[in-house]
Each structure stands twice: as C-alpha cells, then as structure tokens.
Image: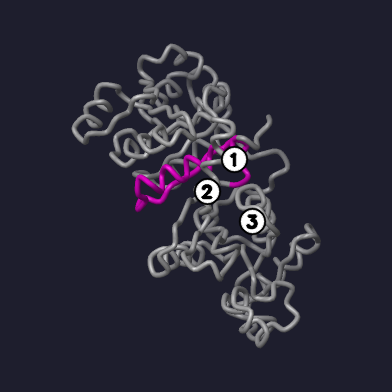
C-alpha cells in the first residue's frame, strides 16, 4: 500500500476533526470533498457560509458533511476573544484587538478552535505564506513539552522504491529554520527521527548532509555539520546517523562504499537533514519536480497540537494528504 493510503487507513481508525481556514481557495473546497468522500477526517471550513457554498456550487463541489463556521456569528466568539486576550495581553494585545483579529484572520480563529479543543488540528498555507500559519500556532498553542525547537519537514514519496524507506524520505528543515546552528540541527534530526517513527515506521537512518564527506573538505560550513552530528550522537545515541556526508554517499550503497566506508548508514539513509533552509527548500522542490515525487508538507514538529503548513504550489490532493497526516498526528497527542 502506498504511503498516503496507509496514512488514510490509519486516520480512519480514530476520526479526527481538522480545520481548513482557507475556504476562499477552490483547492481547499476540492480537498474537503476528497476527505469527506473517503471518510478519513471531519472537516470544518472557516468563513461566510453563503460565499463558501456559492463558490462550491459554481465549481460543482459537494460539501455535504462539512461544517462551516462564520467567526462573526460563532456563539463561542466572546469566549475565544477573552481567551486570546488572556494569552497575549502581556505582549500588548487588547481585548478589542483580540476580537478584531479573530473576525478578520481565519488562521487565528482556526488556531483558537484547536486551542479550545473544538478541533483536533488545522491545515493552512495554500494561499498564505508559512509565517501566516505558524505565527498563530506558536503564539497560541506553543511548543510541545520537552521540545527545544519547532521545525518543519516534508515527507517525500519517490516513485523509485530503491531509495529511502521503500521510496519514502523525511527532508528537514525544509520550511522554517533559516540558519540552524549545530545544536539546532541536532534537535531537528531528533525530532525528524520521532516523526519518521510516528508516520512512516521502521528504523530512522539520519544523514547530516554537507558538500563534504568525512573530511573531504574543510570550512566553517562543514564544521557546523560535524559538530551537529557529534551532538546528535551524544543526545540520542540510539539513532543511526552519520555526518558530515554528501547526498550520494548517504543514499547510494555503491557510492557509500567508496566515499564513506564504514558508515553506519551504508547508503540507506531515509532522513535527510539539510544544513540550512536554502538547501532544504531547494532540495525538496528538485526532488518533487525532477524526480516526480509526492511532497507532503511543510509538516510541523514540536508544536503542542497538530498544525501543518502547505506549499502554495499544492494541489487539492496534496491538501487532502496533509489533512490525513494531521489527523494521524492528532491521534498521538494526549494532552
């Protein structure tokens, strides 16, 4: 069974409610239809019901089964506004400002729904930048207990099953942290290993990527990855990892034998940790476009509740897939 079909099957075992705040985007409505038809999550759309239904009708999209909530008429609006004010008053937010942002910014309203446990997670980003999704999540939901760093990853599903975990990889950080230092890279690797076990299964095998392999080049860039690998081994000695290592030596056994003999990865890495956001973001898009891979994300790790971003280039099928992943993540959250 393909990765995303396995995720959908898992989501069906304990149905969760996911909020989609970007109801003005036709892809969101198409994704809602997919999710409801396949039955792996409940969906709440945020916005004006008349406008949403009109857009759906014009595009022949059946939204039967979706709940549509208009913040302006929502019966719990005052409670949400008061709670948001209490959360943010030390940062200078007034009650009137809390009311205004909940009326005008669907991402904040969706985040409050998750905060109040009236939804299990939310997915946004089809028509807004990553910061518009993550800002309310970090302000309202905060980081998960014990998490030092919130980061973002993609699940990449390649048609060629030769690589990774039957063609499946985690790429991180590909969506959030621009210039992670060595300690941050080690934390991203640890979180990614946990996300791998949660969503994909199997043994995480982490490659700390660089343009150098085992000292073939020397610079502050390689030193950072070497130090990150050292910290990773100290913090999580049970994780199979290697670095600094070049991509080909990380994923191709024949190249690993020549460039990295003795590497514990043996050319079978399934988690790729990129040295910065430039590399991670470019890497996932090259893999998606040239390698015809499915790309799910940016998915968030380290937030206290299930919150995920989308690429603005996503399709309705991509959104539906991220909804399924978000539902599975929500199943794992106990607080």
Which numbered dot is residue 299? 2
User: In this rendering, is residue 160 above or below 150?
Assistant: below
Q: Which of marks 3 and 2 is in front?
A: 2
Marks 2,1: beta carbons within 8 A:
yes
| Element type where label 2 sits in the image | strand
| Residue displayed at 38% across by 28% down | 45
- The residue most toward the left is 58
Which quadrant of the view contains residue 107?
Answer: top left
The answer to whether 7 appears left or right of 185 in the picture is left
Q: How far from the left and from the top, in percent, is residue 1? A: 53, 53
Closer to the N terminus: mark 2 or mark 1? 2
The answer to whether 244 appears left or right of 114 in the picture is right
Which quadrant of the view contains residue 12?
Answer: top right
Residue under numbered circle 1: 329
- The residue most toward the front is 1
| Residue displayed at 30% across by 22% down | 49
Closer to the N terminus: mark 3 or mark 2? 3
| Residue displayed at 56% across by 69% down | 163
Q: Give the range drawn in magenta.
A: 301-330
């Amino acid at each position: 069974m393909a990765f995303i079909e396995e995720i959908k099957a898992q989501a069906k075992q304990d149905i969760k409610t996911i909020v989609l705040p970007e109801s003005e985007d036709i892809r969101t409505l198409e994704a809602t239809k997919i999710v409801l038809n396949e039955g792996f999550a409940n969906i709440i759309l945020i916005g004006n019901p008349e406008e949403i239904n009109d857009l759906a009708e014009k595009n022949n999209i059946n939204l039967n089964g979706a709940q549509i909530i208009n913040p302006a008429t929502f019966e719990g609006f005052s409670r949400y506004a008061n709670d948001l004010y209490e959360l943010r008053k030390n940062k200078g937010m007034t009650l009137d400002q809390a009311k205004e942002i909940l009326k005008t910014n669907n991402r904040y309203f969706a985040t409050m729904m998750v905060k109040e446990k009236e939804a299990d997670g939310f997915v946004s980003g089809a028509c807004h930048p990553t910061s518009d999704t993550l800002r309310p999540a970090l302000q309202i939901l905060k980081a998960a207990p014990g998490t030092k760093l919130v980061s973002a990853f993609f699940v990449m599903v390649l048609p060629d099953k030769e690589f990774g975990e039957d063609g499946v990889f985690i790429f991180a950080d590909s969506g959030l942290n621009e210039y992670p230092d060595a300690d941050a890279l080690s934390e991203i690797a640890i979180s990614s290993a946990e996300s791998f076990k949660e969503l994909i299964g199997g043994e995480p095998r982490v490659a700390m990527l660089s343009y150098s392999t085992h000292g073939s080049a020397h610079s502050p860039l390689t030193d950072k990855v070497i130090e990150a690998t050292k910290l990773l081994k100290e913090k999580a000695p049970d994780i199979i990892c290697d670095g600094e290592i070049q991509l080909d030596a990380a994923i191709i056994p024949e190249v690993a034998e020549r460039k990295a003999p003795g590497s514990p990865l043996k050319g079978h890495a399934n988690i790729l940790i990129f040295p910065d956001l430039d590399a991670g973001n470019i890497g996932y898009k090259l893999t998606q476009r040239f390698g015809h891979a499915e790309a799910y994300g940016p998915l968030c790790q380290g937030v206290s509740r299930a919150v995920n971003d989308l690429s603005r280039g996503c399709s309705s099928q991509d959104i539906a897939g991220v909804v399924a992943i978000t539902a599975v993540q929500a199943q794992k959250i106990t607080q």
